[in-house]
Image: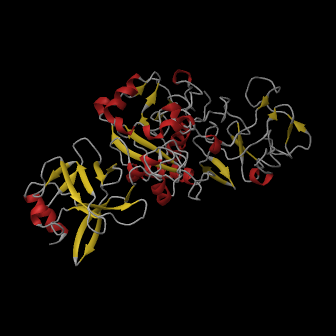
Amino acid sequence: MTVLLRVLAVSALGLSLNACVYGYVKSAYTGEPLYGAGVMVSGTCTGSGCFSSTLNGEATNAEGFFVFDAYGNQHGPDKVKYITPFPGEEAISLFIGHSGHDDVMLYHRPRYESVTQDGQEYLVSNVQTVYLCGAGTPDSDFDGVCDDAESIYGTNPNSRDTDGDRISDFAELYGYGGVDLRYYGANPLKKDVFVEVDYYANRKPSQSAIDKVVAAFANAPVSNPDGTTGIALHVVLDSQIEDVDANPNLSSNWTDFDVIKAKYFPARRAPFFHYALFANTLNSGTSTGLSRGLPGHDFMVTLGAWPTPGGTELQQAGALMHQLGHNLGLQHGGNESTNYKPNYLSVMNDTYQVIGLRVDGVDGTLDYSRLRIASVNEGSLSEPNAFAPLLLSTEADLSHYGVNIQGSWRMGNASANLDFSGNGVISPGIVSLDFNGDGDTLDTVNASQNDWVALAYSGAGSIGDPHLGASLNMVAASAFLVPPDRVEQCLTAPGAKK
């Protein structure tokens, strides 16, 4: 019987088809299959083999294999079990145990793939292999994953958060609180950032805009325990806000935002996901949006009153990356609130937020600062020498970057022959320029930081699951650098300063 015919047959019975859920259980000590391990699944069960509608079990065979069989070819046609999450939930839970071993609870959100076996096609969803720990075996970091299992998974037995992204190894391996993080791509050996994006009608960001930001994080100069570089940004483009709930003009006191969040953002995701709302306008203005504290958990993007309502692809991407950067602890000057710093090459600088950086002559590059650049004095500028790098950054690094000052791309680059004054001539002597528009050239602009190594993943204490436990003091909850009621609205359209 083909899958199509199976679907038709199931539909005729009024049943909901969710195909086989299967996996393997092995010993963390030996790596060998465990025979007779019990797997109890909590979810909605429909089919002839269900012994209750909500709780069902299977046992592993000699290969450590278990399956909740939707087709009847494993346990017989009278033992069919269709397992789906409970209404309103996104994952089923599996309680796995074996005599002499510690139990494991994991969450699994089925991701079905088509496979062919013996000429028949099936839809199957693979639960990750679970390595059960012997009862009482060492768990040096007390994270619920014994040292033997951590050796197999490659995680650090002395750290509850091997990759330092403020999500425990346990949660990234097994999920927590009804959320299967592996479904979204979590890896305990690579830094992950999760964002749920909801949106008003006609304000949905394009997938290509989201992809630009995901690529920027993937290219980040950040090392990981698995030997890779970059940060895995997982953006879940989730729900369109119903018109009746979509206040066309949000306020910066977050009250109307909270009404929407309470209805559309599942509380179970809160320990892991930042929450973003692509709305219309903020405070009747043209600000690109607002972050709820620095660092923080929530942010809004508000491009409804821009010349292209809702923003162009680059504007959407830049605003998303900018507001997320605030959630990750970055200010308009990196480590300070000073905006429009000429020596700060980052989308956090409103100069570059919606136009991107110029790198190797190509405009529109989205990036946080990956350079440390020395301070500059308004009254003592050298156009031939441009900016000076600080430790770990080099002149060669600076030479890749163009510089935009006061809305204009200047001839030269950040390393040499930079036309600060914009007159088209590289002056050999000292020049001056009022960068901040205060009417004098007496100010010193502070040095800029490498943003990527300064990210705060904790969301001011809002990101993180209980399995971090006592090690929370090692990745301490960051206090607000800027509390929610003190965060300024960001860049206004088009290119005007606040």
Above or below, 283 against 196 in this view is above
- Specify the color scheme: secondary structure
At x 38% / y 27%, what residue is drawn? Answer: 258
Question: Residue 152: image x %, image y %?
Answer: 47, 60
In this view, the residue farthest toward the left is 13
**Farthest bottom residue?**
119
Q: Nearer the viewer, residue 423 or 426?
A: 426
Which of 80 and 423 lies nearest the eye of the viewer? Answer: 80
| Residue shown at the point (34%, 37%) measured from the top left | 266
Looking at the image, residue 159 lies above or below residue 114: above
Residue 389 visible in rendering:
yes
Q: Quadrant of the N terminus?
A: bottom left
Q: Quadrant of the C terminus?
A: top right
Number of numbered discs overlaid on the protein picture: 0
Residue 166: x and y, percent? 51, 41
Q: Nearer the viewer, residue 382 or 195?
A: 195
Is residue 456 shown left or right of residue 417? left
- Given residues 184 and 127, the one toward you in this image is 127
In the displayed structure, 240 sits above or below 129; it is above
Q: Position of residue 448 (x, y in %)?
A: 72, 38
**Percent position (x, y) of residue 481?**
60, 28
- Is residue 300 shown above or below 452? above
Residue 274 visible from this viewpoint:
no
Q: Quadrant of residue 379?
A: top right
